[in-house]
Image (spheres, helix red, strand yellow):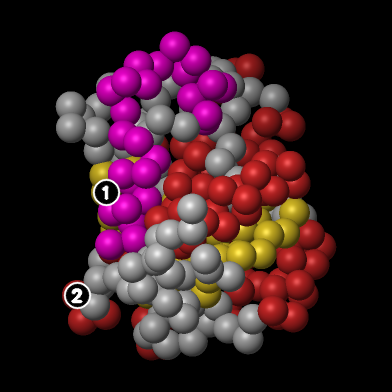
């Protein structure tokens, strides 16, 4: 049955990368529940189709693009389609990310290293660069980071390097966009129950983790915070702390 959005983001347009599942999908749903128009991006067209179908209950404008954030040409095609539908972008959520299997540095393959950096660090840079001409005063950019920016774990060199680099990028971006009154938010969630653990730590205690829906609701509340009390970093952890 169609649901009536709350309306706090009615009239706004958001683009979410990695939106077909996990925290990306939960974020898209939380935005839709507030009346936000959505553009979903992801690499799996089948999963994107399921996401569009599930989110249609919110009666908001919905579009999706197959997009590989590692590829500038793929991003360019997505924004070409986006511009045909929308004249501006109010909220950008750089969520797409991967985690290679936990491997000690001596055994990390060059392919895994480059793929992780390309997805988790170069991807947000490329998408942000393409999105900025569409963003005006009052816009918000969210970069999904990780607890790995504050606490390192053996076997996660590529992932930790990519996320720490993304934190530095986020901090520089915030300073550059401050005069334009575009907010930049660093989302730093602790352990969240998503598929990323299938490669990171298959036996991780999922029952102790935060639910993606809880993180997404907190993120949307941060996005809705008045500009004169802007949230720069949103750090979230399970009630029990680190696993």
Q: Is residue 14 visible?
A: no
Magenta highlight on residue 215: yes
Q: Secondary structure at mark 1?
A: strand
Q: Which residues are magenta?
A: 195-221
Q: CA distance from mark 2 to mark 1?
A: 16 Å
Magenta highlight on residue 243: no
Which residue is at a point 61% across and 65% down the rendered structure image? 62
Q: Toward the viewer: 101 or 83?
A: 83
Give the numbered dot on residue 149.
none
Vertical arrangement, residue 136 with respect to residue 99, above or below? below
Q: Position of residue 57 (x, y in %)?
A: 52, 56
Q: Toward the viewer: 116 or 43?
A: 43
Quick check: 68 left or right of 238?
Answer: right
Q: Position of residue 214 (x, y in %)?
A: 31, 44
Quadrant of the drawing holding the C terminus: top left
Q: Position of residue 152 (x, y in %)?
A: 37, 31
Quick check: 28 left or right of 86?
Answer: left
**Which residue was labeled with disc 2?**
229
């Amino acid at each position: 049955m169609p649901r009536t959005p709350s309306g706090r983001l009615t009239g706004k347009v958001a683009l979410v990368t990695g939106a077909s599942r996990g925290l990306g999908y939960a974020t898209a749903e939380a935005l839709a529940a507030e009346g936000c128009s959505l553009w979903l991006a992801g690499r799996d067209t089948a999963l994107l189709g399921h996401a569009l179908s599930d989110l249609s209950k919110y009666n908001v404008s919905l579009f999706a693009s197959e997009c590989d954030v590692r590829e500038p040409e793929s991003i360019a095609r997505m924004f070409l389609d986006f511009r045909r539908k929308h004249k501006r972008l109010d909220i950008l959520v750089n969520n797409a990310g991967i985690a290679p299997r936990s491997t000690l540095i001596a055994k990390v393959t060059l392919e895994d290293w480059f793929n992780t950096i390309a997805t988790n660090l170069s991807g947000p840079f490329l998408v942000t660069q393409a999105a900025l001409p569409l963003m005006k005063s009052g816009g918000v950019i969210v970069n999904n980071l990780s607890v790995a920016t504050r606490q390192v774990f053996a076997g996660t060199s590529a992932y930790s390097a990519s996320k720490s680099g993304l934190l530095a990028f986020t901090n520089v971006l915030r300073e550059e966009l401050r005069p334009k009154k575009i907010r930049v938010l660093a989302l730093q969630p602790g352990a969240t129950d998503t598929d990323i653990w299938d490669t990171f730590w298959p036996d991780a205690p999922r029952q102790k983790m935060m639910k993606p829906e809880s993180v997404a609701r907190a993120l949307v509340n941060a996005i809705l915070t008045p500009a004169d009390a802007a949230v720069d970093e949103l750090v979230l952890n399970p009630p029990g702390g680190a696993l």
